[in-house]
Image (spheres, rainbow, N blue to C red):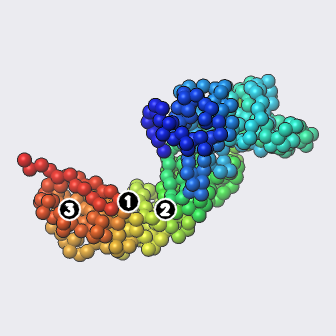
Amino acid sequence: MHRGPYKDEWKDYETELAAACAGFSSLSSQAKTDLLETLRLGVAWGDAGYGGKGWNCAGLDKRFGRTKLTKKLLDQRQRVFNAPNELPGYTRHYDAVLTGSGNIKTLMVSTMEECAEECNLDATCISFDWCSSGRFANPNTCALKSSGSAATGFRDCKNVPSLAGTCSGCDNYEKSTKAFEIHHVASTAAAFGVALADGRAISWGKQDSGGNSPWNGKIASVLDADEALTGGTGFAQCATKLYSTQRAFMAKLETCPIQVSSSSSARRELAERTPLRRLSHLVAPTLIAWGDSFSGGSLTTAEVAAIDSAGGIQQVAATNGAFAVLTANGGVVTFGSSFEGGAGPTPALSSGVTSIEATEFAFAAMKSDGTVAAWGDIKSGGALPSAMTTELAADGGAASIYANNVAFAALTSNGNVVAWGDPGNGGNLSNVASTLASGTVLTIQPSGSAFTATIKSTS
């Protein structure tokens, strides 16, 4: 994904963009530049099976022919593309249309996503009716609505039989102005996930790698009935942060604010919450995981309770197939593949831990007394040799820990370095021992399979 200024940079991608977008070749140079700028706003590309479902360029030449993408309009387009079975930024009102005098225009477009793009490009658009059949002679009708429509309210096609013939096959999508904001982004090896401002965590890509989140394609009433998100309280929790292994996601959950429609009382509030009577034994969940269950995509009630009782999450580290949660009271809770650190350290770490680092298959935890515990795959740093434990203690203990893909390095309080893990990829210091003069190392930076140290000048 490209970030930053674009000046005729589209020429570097002309072949790819022309292949993806039928109307690209006929655009002006400025329009091509404007298109490439939109790639900064949440577009995914590449192998569709790995989350890179191509951006929908249908009708591109038509849209660019009539609309100049100014910065203001580009800002309005900011949203997540390609999330399957979901339309981020909109609340879906099933079998309903919005009536009144505030119709902006009616369009014939190919997809619901295109209809949403048209609404996003119009500052006065508050919602749109998407009719795939029934209401008009032609299917796939997009009717954009302005605030004037709210005076009359919803026409409920599902619950008012006399209206069924006038708007069956139509749904109204109400724009949420802040729901497009992305709070957090994460990825597995074959899926992407985003935590949105409205509290949903949407993911796409391979389902067995986390590409189908518990929020995908669900309206508020369905989410409020999902016990995995409510704990039986009647309120779905909101995702505030995402974490990932290579095949699973985990979301941190917090209490959602009650959302009340800002429109007139005549507007039907399908998202209105109807909470169950709160019972003292009901506790809202604080974490949820999905994806490959053997790679951290499944959390037990006991694991969540252990994290909650220890004060909640302070830090999360992940190997390829396991999570390690550092709790607020300094303990560690792990889950996922036992071969990749999910079984946890022996003995268990219940307090005193200040940070956790991870290679691809192992974890290392640093404690407040300078000692280090490691677990997981031994070849990837999952065991700290006793000689190095002694060396750390003699040199004031660990001040910080670093990890590349298969090895760890600890910077001691006295400025020396101790390393372990794959000896050919940074886990052995013998070749640089003379260079790392005693007490001169300031910081360490890992790459995928090596380390580099910043050394204090002696001159």
Q: Earlier in the sequence, mark 1 or mark 3?
A: 1
Kind of residue at badge 2: Gln
- For mark 3, what is the residue? 417
Measured from the top left, where is residue 161 in percent x and y?
91, 43
- Position of residue 395 in the picture relative to residue 57 (left or right): left
**Foreground of the two, 70 or 361:** 70
Task: Say few, some or many: other residues with alpha carbon within 10 Å of mark 3 (under 14 / 14 to 19 / 20 or more).
Answer: many
Asked whether the viewer can see residue 223, the reply is yes
Task: Give residue 334's quadrant in the image.
Answer: bottom left
**Depicted 34 relative to depicted 111: above or below:** above
Cβ atoms at labels 1 and 2 below 8 Å apart: no
Distance CA(mark 3)–CA(mark 2): 29 Å
The label number, if any, that marks residue 246 in the structure image: 2
Task: Say few, some or many: other residues with alpha carbon within 10 Å of mark 1 (under 14 / 14 to 19 / 20 or more).
Answer: some
Measured from the top left, where is residue 448 in percent x and y?
35, 59
Between circles 1 and 3, the one closer to the viewer is 3
- Position of residue 50 in the picture relative to residue 216 (left or right): left
- For mark 1, what is the residue? 329
The structure residue drawn at horizontal position 45% and vertical position 57%, both measured from the top left corner, is: 312
